[in-house]
Amino acid sequence: MKHDDDMINKEQKKRKSLKILLIILIILAIIIGGGYIATNVYIDGKLGKINFENITGNTEELGINNENKENEMAKYRNIALLGLDSRYDTYDTDYRTDCIMVASINEDTHDVQLYSIYRDTYVQMDSNDGTTKMDKINHAYYGGVQNTLKTINTNLDLNITEYVIVDFDAVIDLVDSVGGIDINIDSEEIKYINNYIKDVTKVTGKKANQITKTGTQHLNGVQAVSYCRIRYTSGWDYKRTERMREVLEKVVSQIKHCSIGEINNLLDIMLPKIRTNITGKEIKAFIPQALSFNIKSSFGWPYKTVGVTLGGQFYGPAATLESNVKKLHREVYGQTDYEVPQSVKDISDKIVKTTGVKE
């Protein structure tokens, strides 16, 4: 069963995704801003390729604190950007969200802050039988995307109702569509990247050469995804999320130099690989904002975490959940007088009791 964490070479199953929605918005904004073929028919035709799948709009079922409808959080549009560890171009719940990111968009200023939630973060979530349990946050997807959003909202006191999902194959095609990217490979990374390249080529059937030397290398899609998957170097999973953000920045830089024909081809390849509950109409209305997006920061959360082993499994609890949530709301959402709700305090106390991890 794919649920079993002890499957052969479990570390080689990690599939990384990036902030695909923002990339698509940037691409479409370039088309519109440059005056290229920007007809409604053209845009509607492109957006119609995206896979739309709705979820509940009930805030309670999504774990949203009612106060977040009225306080400073109300002006932020938070979108969950999820990457599955799927090998088979499917989005069923046998897989995990090994990449979890949040795009927080201030709708007044158009400032955007992006942050990754580390996959091993120890949190409370719903089980499929209706009970609650403590587990890695990337396991929440076993209960579906709605359970993932509820888990994030419940533990981080957020108001997320929207999501975008892709699997790792989409990232391969994205990088290949822009002609590859230049990445500096250091001596630690080269020890691991070739094993990942071998695994990705086997799974996808797509070819890539081994990396034979350190320094700046021009990577194709398979090689770039393999670079994103490297985990066992200094910085561990935290460094891995930095690699993922680096790949995104390189891709966006390459897009700016693509011809209209290349951009059109990129959209045709990428859009069918996306699943979201954001409608084409909503995305189209959102496009003009992308022209004025100001990405202020990109970081990993929790700010402070400590690795522990429980029952033979590695977890990364926040130190503590309460203090990390408080810092997030104050620094990202400008809630200077923010205090975590009792529900988050209770979860935080439970994590401390279970793991022994304190500030």
Image (cartoon, grey):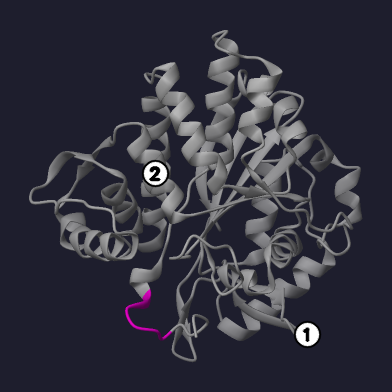
Residue at point 75%, 26% (across, down): 285
Question: Closest to the observer: 3 or 104?
Answer: 3
| Residue extending furthest toward the top | 35
Question: Closest to the observer: 169 or 345?
Answer: 169
| Residue extending furthest toward the left | 212
| Image spot of residue 339 (x, y percent) | 79, 55
State if disc 2 and disc 1 touch (CB < 8 Å): no
Magenta stretch: give its range: 6-10
> Which quadrant, please, contains the C terminus?
bottom right
| Image spot of residue 76 (x, y percent) | 76, 38
| Image spot of residue 322 (x, y percent) | 69, 63
Q: Quadrant of residue 63?
A: bottom right
* Residue 172 appears in view: yes
> Is 7 part of what is drawn in magenta?
yes
Residue at point 64%, 71% (across, down): 140
Question: Left or right of 337: which side holds 20?
Answer: left
Q: Which residue is mark 1?
A: 131
As shown in the figure, which amino acid type bears the numbered disc 1?
Thr
As shown in the figure, which amino acid type bears the numbered disc 2?
Asp
Q: Which residue is mark 2?
A: 173
Between tags 1 and 2, which lies in front?
2
Q: Main secondary structure of the magenta part?
A: loop
Q: Earlier in the sequence, mark 1 or mark 2?
A: 1
Residue at point 78%, 53% (across, down): 54
User: Is label 1 in a helix, a strand or a loop?
Assistant: loop
| Image spot of residue 280 (x, y percent) | 72, 35
User: Is label 2 in a helix, a strand or a loop?
Assistant: helix
Estimate how packed mark 1 is, as few (under 14), some (14 to 19) or many (20 or more) residues with alpha carbons within 10 Å: few
Q: Quadrant of residue 15?
A: bottom left
Question: Closest to the observer: 202 or 164?
Answer: 202
